[in-house]
Image (cartoon, helix red, strand yellow):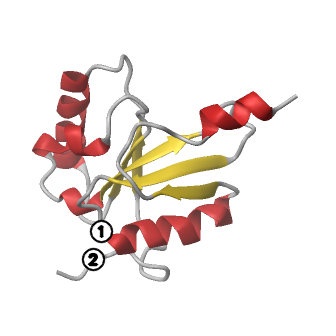
């Protein structure tokens, strides 16, 4: 299947990034189900959850290749984000985010293993 994202084709596409609180898995599954039903084809899905990998929320997402973890750093003046596949995320989708996000002043780091550890909490320990 040809994916609608890519460095050129991804321009003009939609990104649905959702941070849902509280950190309850059943709420996240239901929320992604609603987003999946409402979203246009080609929309990239990203979760900001640091408690659960996106694969656990994807129960009702029909096209799991368009879902990834996208964990934004805090405080907000740190313009960086951790990207991570859910194990089924399309490689082209991640490559598109890695290429396009810096155009918006957000600098991505790709985590290559499925885990809940993000770089950001450790960076804060070294700040004055």
Mark 1: give few (<14), some (14-19) or many (20+) Cα within 10 Å.
some
Q: Is residue 77 above or below residue 37?
A: above
x and y percent of residue 89 in the render? Answer: 29, 62
Say which residue appears at 54% left-offset and 66% top-offset: 98
Q: Is residue 89 above or below residue 96?
A: above
Mark 2: give few (<14), some (14-19) or many (20+) Cα within 10 Å.
some
Q: Is residue 103 above or below residue 87?
A: below
> As drawn, is 67 to the left or to the right of 126?
left
- Image quarter in which the N terminus is found: bottom left
Dot 2: element: loop
Farthest residue, direction top? 22
> As drawn, is 59 to the left or to the right of 50?
left
x and y percent of residue 92 in the render? Answer: 37, 75
Say which residue appears at 42% left-offset and 80% top-offset: 9
Label 2, on which residue? 3
Q: Is residue 112 visible?
A: yes
Say which residue appears at 22% left-offset and 38% top-offset: 57
Task: Say which of marks 1 and 2 sits in front.
Answer: 1
x and y percent of residue 64 in the render? Answer: 20, 57
Dot 1: element: loop
Farthest residue, direction right? 128
Label 1, on which residue? 90
User: Badges 1 and 2: C-beta atoms under 8 Å apart?
Assistant: yes
- Mark 1 vs 2, N-terminal side: 2
Distance from Cα at disc 1 to Cα at disc 2: 8 Å
Residue 3 lies in quadrant: bottom left
- Image quarter in which the C terminus is found: top right
User: Which one is nearer the viewer's eye here, 70 or 100?
Assistant: 70
């Amino acid at each position: 299947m040809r994916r609608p994202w890519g460095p050129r084709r991804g321009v003009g596409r939609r990104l649905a990034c959702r941070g849902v609180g509280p950190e309850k898995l059943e709420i996240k599954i239901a929320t992604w189900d609603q987003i999946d039903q409402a979203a246009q084809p080609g929309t990239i899905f990203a979760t900001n959850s640091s408690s659960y990998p996106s694969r656990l929320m994807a129960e009702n997402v029909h096209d799991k290749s368009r879902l990834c973890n996208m964990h934004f750093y805090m405080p907000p003046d740190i313009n960086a984000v951790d990207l991570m596949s859910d194990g089924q995320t399309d490689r082209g989708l991640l490559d598109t985010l890695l290429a396009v996000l810096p155009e918006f002043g957000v600098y991505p780091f790709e985590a290559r293993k499925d885990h809940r550890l993000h770089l950001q909490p450790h960076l804060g320990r070294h700040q004055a």
